[in-house]
Image (tube, rainbow, N blue to C red):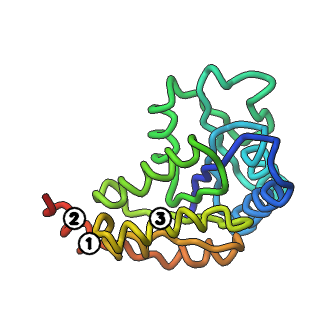
């Protein structure tokens, strides 16, 4: 992977461990010479992941929308900041720039980006790895929900196994680097009614 898109929260009102993990994820990407693509913000985990990558000399591309491109929200120290017309264009551009996707803890926006990415993988729209950094067991309830969906027949086991989840940035990146897309599951899913 030469480029990874990181989805994450922008709130500053979160536990310090979340911010520290975001900074470490940025550092881990830069140390591997993997370009960071993210939402372009300077607050919360968004700012921390960018700052972590920049602290190690990494390349960082932010993609932001006009309403968020303000002095209070936009990160000004990036390699490049692109302004997309709206949220749909923003997500499409971030997907286009990335070879893989990682969700750090976040809220509705992060979940929206994560689930769209997983859905696109399920339908064969991309064959890129998707990972979760499970800081403070943030994603454990979601993983349990995914497992329940598999047990109830709503998700194929292959698609569930394709969601990597680790607590350490380097371990997560190593797992994602070994990703093999579940082509047969995609074909099988597309035949389902």
Residues marked 1 and 3 touching at CB (< 8 Å): no
Identify the residue position indicated by label 3 in the image. 145
| Separation (CA) of disc 1 from disc 3 | 20 Å
Horizontal side of residue 181 vs 131, given as left or right: left
Write the residue at 63% across / 40% down.
Answer: 39
Could you tell me which secondary element the residue under label 1 belongs to? helix
Could you tell me residue 149's position as x and y percent?
Answer: 37, 66
Mark 3 is surrounded, within 10 Å at the Cα level, by few (under 14), some (14 to 19) or many (20 or more) other residues, namely few
Could you tell me which secondary element the residue under label 2 belongs to? helix
Horizontal side of residue 74 vs 8, given as left or right: right
Identify the residue position indicated by label 2 in the image. 189
Mark 1 is surrounded, within 10 Å at the Cα level, by few (under 14), some (14 to 19) or many (20 or more) other residues, namely some
Horizontal side of residue 130 vs 134, given as left or right: left
Quarter holding the C terminus is bottom left
- Residue 140 has which mark? none
Mark 1 and mark 3 lie on one chain; the one further toward the N terminus is 3
Residue nearest the viewer, comparing 92 with 45: 45
Could you tell me residue 61's position as x and y percent?
Answer: 65, 43
Identify the residue position indicated by label 1 in the image. 185
Could you tell me which secondary element the residue under label 3 belongs to? helix
Residues marked 2 and 3 touching at CB (< 8 Å): no
Mark 2 and mark 3 lie on one chain; the one further toward the N terminus is 3
Is the residue 111 above or below the residue 190 in the image? above
Is the residue 106 above or below the residue 87 in the image? below
Quarter holding the N terminus is bottom right
Horizontal side of residue 60 vs 85, given as left or right: right
């Amino acid at each position: 992977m030469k480029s990874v898109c990181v989805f994450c929260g922008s709130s500053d009102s979160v536990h310090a461990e979340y911010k520290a993990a975001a900074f470490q994820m940025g550092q881990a990407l830069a140390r591997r010479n993997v370009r960071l693509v993210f939402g372009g913000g300077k607050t919360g985990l968004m700012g921390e992941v960018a700052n972590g990558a920049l602290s190690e000399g990494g390349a960082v591309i932010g993609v932001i929308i006009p309403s968020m491109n303000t002095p209070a929200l936009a990160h000004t120290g990036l390699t490049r900041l692109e302004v997309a017309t709206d949220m749909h264009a923003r997500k499409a551009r971030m997907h286009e720039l990335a070879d893989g996707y990682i969700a750090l803890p976040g809220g509705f926006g992060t979940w929206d980006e994560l689930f769209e990415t997983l859905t696109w993988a399920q339908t064969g729209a991309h064959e890129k790895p998707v990972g979760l950094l499970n800081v403070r067991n943030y994603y454990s309830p979601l993983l349990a929900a995914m497992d329940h969906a598999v047990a109830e027949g709503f998700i194929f086991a292959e698609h569930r196994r394709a969601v990597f989840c680790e607590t350490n940035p380097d371990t997560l990146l190593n797992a994602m680097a070994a990703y093999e897309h579940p082509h047969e599951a995609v074909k099988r899913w597309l035949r389902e009614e």
